[in-house]
Image: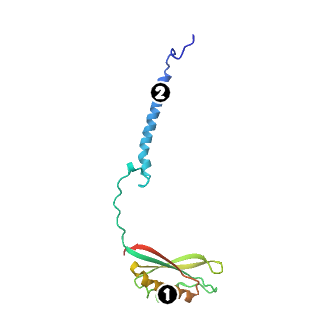
């Protein structure tokens, strides 16, 4: 006679297999639960679900006062093939044209850049970046001074242009 599923003797493998499944499910649940806070910690406050958001600390007011930051980019290569503008020539220009117009201060940084000239040629040259900071209330009276500096440099050193970049800033000294 062949045993049926109802008469078959239980082997020790049946309950053991059930206990292993239960242990695996319990371990998986524990690992998923432990990983959840880590996953949420990696999210920004805006990306977190509403139930896990915490109140953001109050934002600190921005330091400083509103200023304009104007950067002027001065090339040193001369279009006519003459010798490049030297450090001595550039610093003499700053002393004669920039300092009288902006005696409160300025910053000069050495640079290297490239641009496409009016003939379509890519020119590479040593350059200077002049940075001016002034209160936003002084933007209108300073604009003609800045344009005078640009025009004087182009005329004195035969340049096609002097780039100007104006940006808002908050400044505290």
x then y, percent, for residue 106: 44, 81
Pick whichever, 39 or 51, lies toward us. 51
Q: Residue at x 43, y 34 (%)?
A: 26
Pick whichever, 54 or 90, lies toward us. 54
x then y, percent, for residue 169: 42, 73
What residue is disc 1 on? 148
158 horizontally vs 142: left or right: right
Which badge, 1 or 2, comes first in the chain's sequence?
A: 2
Residue 101 in view here: yes
Quadrant holding the N terminus: top right
When the figure is inspected, residue 3 is found, relative to residue 35, above or below; the finding is above
Quadrant holding the C terminus: bottom left
What residue is disc 2 on? 18
Q: How many marks?
A: 2
Q: Residue at x 45, y 32 (%)?
A: 23
Q: Residue at x 43, y 82 (%)?
A: 140
Query: How would you rate the neighbour count of disc 1 (Cα within 10 Å): few for under 14, some for 14-19, many for 20 or more?
Result: some
Corner quadrant of residue 115: bottom right
x then y, percent, for residue 24: 47, 33
Look at discs 1 and 2 and give the one toward the viewer. 1
Q: CA distance from mark 1 to mark 2?
A: 88 Å
Helix, strand or loop at disc 2? helix
Q: Residue at x 53, y 76 (%)?
A: 111
Helix, strand or loop at disc 1? helix
Residue 91 in view here: no
Find residue 38 and name its label. none
């Amino acid at each position: 006679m062949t045993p049926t599923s109802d008469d078959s003797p239980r082997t020790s493998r049946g309950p053991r297999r059930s206990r292993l499944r239960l242990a695996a499910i319990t371990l998986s649940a524990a690992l998923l639960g432990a990983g959840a806070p880590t996953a949420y910690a990696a999210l920004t406050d805006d990306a977190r679900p509403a139930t896990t958001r915490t109140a953001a600390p109050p934002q600190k007011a921005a330091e400083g006062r509103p200023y304009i930051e104007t950067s002027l980019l001065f090339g040193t290569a001369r279009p006519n093939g003459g010798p490049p503008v030297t450090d001595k020539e550039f610093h003499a220009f700053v002393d004669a044209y920039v300092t009288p117009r902006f005696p409160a201060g300025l910053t000069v940084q050495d640079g290297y850049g490239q641009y496409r000239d009016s003939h379509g040629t890519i020119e590479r040259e040593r350059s200077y970046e002049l940075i001016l900071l002034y209160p936003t209330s002084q933007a209108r009276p300073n604009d003609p001074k800045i344009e005078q500096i640009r025009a004087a440099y182009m005329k004195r050193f035969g340049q096609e242009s002097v780039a100007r970049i104006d940006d808002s800033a908050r400044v505290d000294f």
